[in-house]
Image: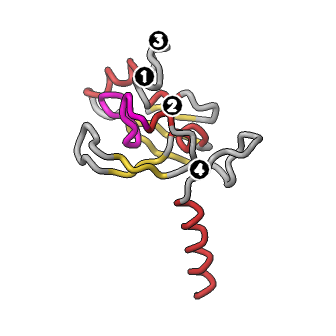
Amino acid sequence: NKVFFQRWAQRRSITLNVHAPNAAGKFPFPRVDLLVLSAGEDGHVASLFPKSAHLNDKTWNYLEVKNAPKPPPARWTISPEILRQSATNLIFFLGPEKQQALKLALDPQIKAEEYPIKMAMESQNPKQIL
């Protein structure tokens, strides 16, 4: 058991450090297999809100969100690179109030900085939009 927990702790410390891509543009560990996501009415996803400074983060990391425009104001999220590089994104637009969000998310004129859910939808990897 001691060896198991030592390895677990080592993996955790690696995961929680900031990771940037190497010279070939690859990250130092495998991508996430599956992300299950829900879009906000304002187009936010995974606590990445429109016009947030975090939208330009190029690391592979967890990010602290302070003063989020929706409760709770303090949260943790994943970087946009994790969102973009996941193997599969399962994206939900649940309820009638999200139908306008889906319409805007599908609009090619709207950029991801304005509507972060587009980062997950424009990923080169498989995605399902429900």
Nearest to viewer (mark 2 / mark 1): 2
* Quadrant in the picture for the N terminus: bottom right
> Contact, CB < 8 Å: mark 3 with mark 1?
no
Q: Is residue 26 left or right of residue 1?
A: right
Packing grade of label 4 (10 A; few <14, some 14-19, many >=20) is: some
The residues colored magenta run 40-53
Counting residues from the N terminus, which is met first, the one under dot 1 or under dot 4? 4
Say which mark, if any, is on residue 32.
4
Residue extending farthest right: 24
Q: Is residue 33 above or below residue 16?
A: above
Residue in view at x 27 percent, y 43 percent: 67
Packing grade of label 2 (10 A; few <14, some 14-19, many >=20) is: many
Q: Is residue 62 above or below residue 70?
A: below
Which residue lies under the disc numbered 1?
Answer: 105
Q: Is residue 45 magenta?
A: yes
Which residue lies under the disc numbered 3?
Answer: 109
**Whole-number angstrom distance, CA of label 2 to CA of label 1:** 10 Å
**Whole-number angstrom distance, CA of label 1 to CA of label 4:** 23 Å
Which residue lies under the disc numbered 2?
Answer: 119
Query: Residue 16: percent from the left, percent from the top?
Result: 52, 60
Counting residues from the N terminus, which is met first, the one under dot 2 or under dot 1? 1
Counting residues from the N terminus, which is met first, the one under dot 3 or under dot 2? 3
> Contact, CB < 8 Å: mark 4 with mark 3?
no
Query: Residue 125: percent from the left, percent from the top?
Result: 63, 35
Query: Residue 66: percent from the left, percent from the top?
Result: 31, 46
What type is the residue that disc 3 sits on?
Answer: Gln
Packing grade of label 1 (10 A; few <14, some 14-19, many >=20) is: many
* Quadrant in the picture for the C terminus: top left
Counting residues from the N terminus, which is met first, the one under dot 4 or under dot 3? 4
Q: Nearer the viewer, residue 54 or 34?
A: 54
**Whole-number angstrom distance, CA of label 2 to CA of label 4:** 15 Å
Q: Is residue 108 above or below residue 115?
A: above
